[in-house]
Structure formats: C-alpha cells, structure tokens
Image (tube, helix red, strand yellow):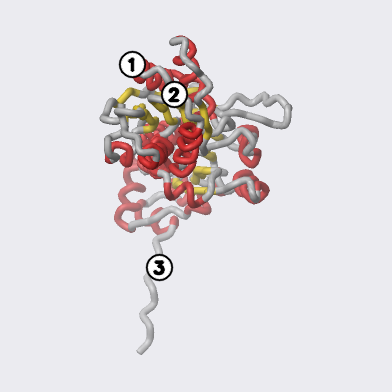
Amino acid sequence: MGVKAQAQAPTLEMVAARAGVSRATVSRVVNGSPKVKPELLKAVNAAIAELNYVPNRAARSLASRRTESIALVIPESTTRVFADPFFALIIQGVAVYLATTDYTLGIVVASEANPDKTRRYLTGGNIDGALVVSHHSGDHSYARLGRTVPVVFGGRPLHSYDGEADTVESFYVDVDNIEGSFTATRHLIERGRTNIATIAGPADMPAGFDRELGWRRAMTEAGLNTTLIEWGDFSPASGAMAMRRLLARKAPLDAVFAANDQMALGAYAAIAEAGLSIPDDIAVVGYDDDALGSAASPALTTMHQSMTELGAAMAEKLVKIIEGEPVEHATILKTRLIVRGSS
C-alpha cells in the first residue's frame, strides 16, 4: 500500500488566485504595506484565513532585512542562570511582551570564556536586537553592540573599554538601586540598629555598585560605621561565606543589608550556625523580593522590584528602537520596602 502524498502547503500564488488579486498585492499585504486598498486587503485576508496560509518567514526576512528574532543575553554560567529565580522572572516578562508582537525570543547564556562566539552570533545578522541582563563592566563581547545592533540593558551599564571612552549612549531599564538600598538601610536604622553590615554584590555590576552606595550613604548620614562590608556574587553560598567573615571579625553587629535576597538567605544559614537568632540578635534585609525570601523563616524583609515588569519594559523599548520609534534612553522603575519578620 503506497504512502498517501502530503497535501501541498498553500502558496502565495494560491492565495492570489483565491482572492482574485495579483501575487504582488498578496505580498504587500503579508509584509504589512499600507499601500493596499481596503477592499483588496479584506479579500486577501479572507483568502489567507480560508487556505490557512502561513507566510514564508525566510522570504519575508529577505524582503524586510529583518529576522524578527531578539536575543536575550545572560553573561553568567548555566548553573547560576537556572538556580536564580531572578532570571526566570526576567525571561517571563520578556516572553509575555514579545508574545504580543511578531518577534521570537532566543536566549544566549554566555560567559567570557568564548567571547568571539557570542560576538559573531550577535553581529552576524541572526537577530534584530539584543537584551542584556546581569552584565559586568568587563563583558566586552556585547558591550559595544549598540554601534551595530540595537541593544537594551537590564540595569545601568557600567562600560569599561580599557580606558577608551564610548560615544554611544546606552538604552536601559533599571530601578533606582541607590535609593532602594538607602531606604532598606534607613529602615534598619529607624528600628534602632546601629551596627549595620552589608553583603555587597560585585562592584563590576551596576546593581552591586549602586546598592553598596545606597547603604554607605544611609550609614554616613546617620554617623554610623561603614567598615562592616563584605562582598558576594549574588549567590546564596557567597552570602553565607560573607556573613561568616563578618561574624569572624568579632565586631559589634546587630543588622545586615544584603544586596539581594539570595545572599540574604545565605546569611541566614551562617547566622544560625553561629547560634544567633533573626531578628533578635541580627536583623536582615534583602533586595529583589523573590519567592524564596517570602517563604523563609522568619520571612525576609526586602526591597521589592518587579523582575517581570523589568523584562517587559526592556522588550518594549527594544522593539520600539528596532521599528524606528522614539524612546528615552533610560527607564527607571519603582521599588518599595516590604517589611516582614526578619527586621
């Protein structure tokens, strides 16, 4: 018994014949041209629906010189990306927004181990634009993308080009990290805490740099000690190690502001190991408001920022840039203090 031949997929010519128009008219409709009379547009769309015609994406790309693809670049290890809920929420926000457009999303998880591979992909005509999150000042594989490919950063970019000044003003979406960490630290001061440490994030990342500045500003304005500082890499393990180093100093310590919730939860473990309690002995405040912090015991006081809103705002800004619409270079989203049992 022979195999039944597969039905031919509808073609542009078949749509034109069904609608009673030329092939060129159908092509103009498919590519969104405004130069089509309303009655012809209606006829072509009806024929497309009847035949279940799907436009050839490759042909459309050749005609428009667009791929209708956007890359989300995360310059971190795969272990870090899949372990930290921050990235999942960013991706969710980007994907939800792009679902309302014709653009598809590709994710590039790339460290600086092979920067040339990342650079070749991003500048090789594979994408119309890129979104970059969790970037470091020395991540050169995409830092200059704005010169050749539209790019939007998640977070204020910290450019470092070996001393060479960059003349391209970056587009980015961020929260006011300095004000947020200032608010978090002021909360601890207002609760009567006077020996407040911080577990800061990496100084080569905008969030790490700015959140340390906010803590330092609040402490300085209150006339308090600013030497109780250790650094982590935003992971729980690094937060635990930083907290152990703070406790090993044997200096007075009654509170800690951690630059993200993951490091704050790492600090929880180190505080418990030392036989101390939260918040009686040491109050703890984090930053991000992820689900793990709210489920901790005691629940973590934190600065709320909407990562899904951040991802959606990044995607919206990039699409507008690609399509030639005017946008502001910087979009700053709001944060708010969420007070729970840890403080």
**CA distance for labels 3 and 2:** 78 Å
Is 245 drawn above or below residue 31 in the view shown? Answer: above
Q: Residue at x 36, y 80 (%)?
A: 4
Residue at label 1? 192
Of the residues shown, which amino acid type is indicated by label 1? Answer: Gly
Q: Residue at x 73, y 27 (%)?
A: 163
Looking at the image, is mark 3 or mark 1 earlier in the sequence?
3
Residue placed farthest to the bottom in the image?
1
Mark 2 lies on a secondary structure that is loop
Local crowd at mark 3 within 10 Å, few (<14), some, or many (≥20)? few
Tell whether label 2 touches label 1 (CB within 8 Å): no
Q: Residue at x 51, y 36 (%)?
A: 232
Residue at label 2? 252
Tell whether label 2 touches label 3 (CB within 8 Å): no
Specify whether residue 162 is in view. yes
Looking at the image, is mark 3 or mark 2 earlier in the sequence?
3
Residue at label 3? 8
**CA distance for labels 1 and 2:** 14 Å
Instruction: Locate residue 43, reporting x and y percent.
Output: 33, 46
Instruction: Locate residue 342, reporting x and y percent.
Output: 30, 30
Tell whether label 1 touches label 3 (CB within 8 Å): no
Badge nearest the viewer, 3 or 1 = 1
